[in-house]
Amino acid sequence: MSEDDWTELHATFRVEQPFDEGRQAYIGCNDDGGRFRADMLQLYEGDYVPWQAAAEGRENLFANASFEEGTEPWFFQHRENRNTRRTFRRASFMLSRILANMGVSAETPLLEHFSNPPGGRGDEAAEPLVKNGDFSVDADEDGVADGWTCEVTGEGTSRARERVEPGAEKWCQRATCERPNADGRSEVILVQQGVPVKEGQWYRISLRARAEGTNGVSVAMTIANTETWRFFFEQEAFAPDEEWRDFTFLVQPNDTADANTRFQIWHSGVGTVWYSDVHMEPIDAPDKGRWLAGLYLDEPEECDDPYRFFRW
């Protein structure tokens, strides 16, 4: 068929038996990227004759055959040829890998999505919600960073503000409990008062931590209302080990408070823990942003190749 000229197409068929419910007539195109236009559709009894002859002498069983009255009662459906698309996606992925092995880089928009955390990035110029979260200030030199309290219960306890490693510019807060007290209690709790929260607002809370001699004990973190002693969100748990590790939590408070709040990190047991880089910032809802904007190119399907979704 010509791209610019109209071509008349026809097909004849025999009806073997009646069908009172009626039948569905359709035309379709299966070529990738193809487009077609249709007009002057007709269905009539008898042998084939050109459009003008049929229009003059026979009843057209199609209603609104030339779409002069809109598109009713016709309907239109679009479906993609996904097998062809999958092949193209996989071939593109393999070509990128081959080029990478040859030293030729390819664009990786997927990695750009992951570089932007859920909820987006906070305003770095805004006043921090957690004060002295890097533990860099200890004006009274009492071994606890200013703005914080560090309580250790047990025997052989100690606490100190230390550098994360000798000669480093970053600081951390250390707390040690060698053994339980006479009552069998051993606990470490790091607290900052007056951290504001807003009901319904999402926050990202992040920190770094490591531990020794705690036997993998779980550490809890939350913000409590000191008037009711209820948590603004369910406590988050994490388990630091001997290496410095980053921990991040997305939380949504159930109430609003500008004062009478208590940001707390605590655990029971013996051993030593170090905390550093405690940060809290308001963010957009985590179901917005990168997860819904361009992460997947295609609609996921059951038993499908997951790699084809990514724009490598």
Image (cartoon, rainbow, N blue to C red):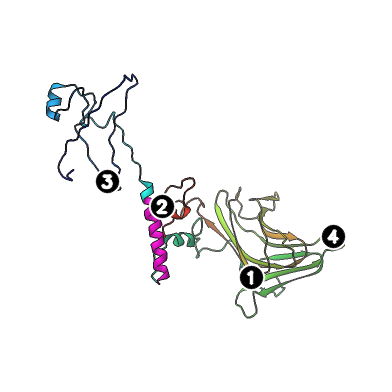
In depth, the one of 294 and 284 nearer the eye is 294
| Magenta-colored span | 85-102
Report the Cα–Cα distance between label 4 and label 2.
57 Å
Horizontal relation, residue 249 to residue 176: left or right: left
> Where's residue 252, x and y in %?
58, 51
Quarter in which the C terminus is drawn: bottom left
Identify the residue position indicated by label 3 in the image: 34
> Where's residue 302, x and y in %?
49, 45
In depth, the one of 102 and 111 nearer the eye is 102
* Residue occupying the point 33% across, 40% down: 78
**Residue type beneath disc 3:** Gly
> Where's residue 140, x and y in %?
69, 74
Q: Which mark is residue 184?
A: 4
Report the Cα–Cα distance between label 2 and label 3.
20 Å
Q: How many marks?
A: 4
Is the magenta region chiefly helix, strand or loop?
A: helix
Q: Which of marks 4 and 3 is nearer the N terminus?
A: 3
Q: Earlier in the sequence, mark 4 or mark 2?
A: 4
Q: Earlier in the sequence, mark 3 or mark 1?
A: 3
Q: Which of marks 1 and 2 is nearer the N terminus?
A: 1
Identify the residue position indicated by label 1 in the image: 135
**Residue type beneath disc 1:** Phe
- Mark 4 and mark 1 in contact? Answer it, CB < 8 Å: no
In depth, the one of 213 and 312 nearer the eye is 312
- Mark 2 and mark 3 in contact? Answer it, CB < 8 Å: no
Q: Which mark is residue 297?
A: 2
> Where's residue 244, x and y in %?
63, 69
* Residue occupying the point 83% across, 63% down: 180
Q: Badge 3: few (under 14), some or many (20 or more) residues near its Cα, within 10 Å?
A: few
Q: Helix or strand or loop: what does disc 4 sit on?
A: loop
Q: Badge 4: few (under 14), some or many (20 or more) residues near its Cα, within 10 Å?
A: few
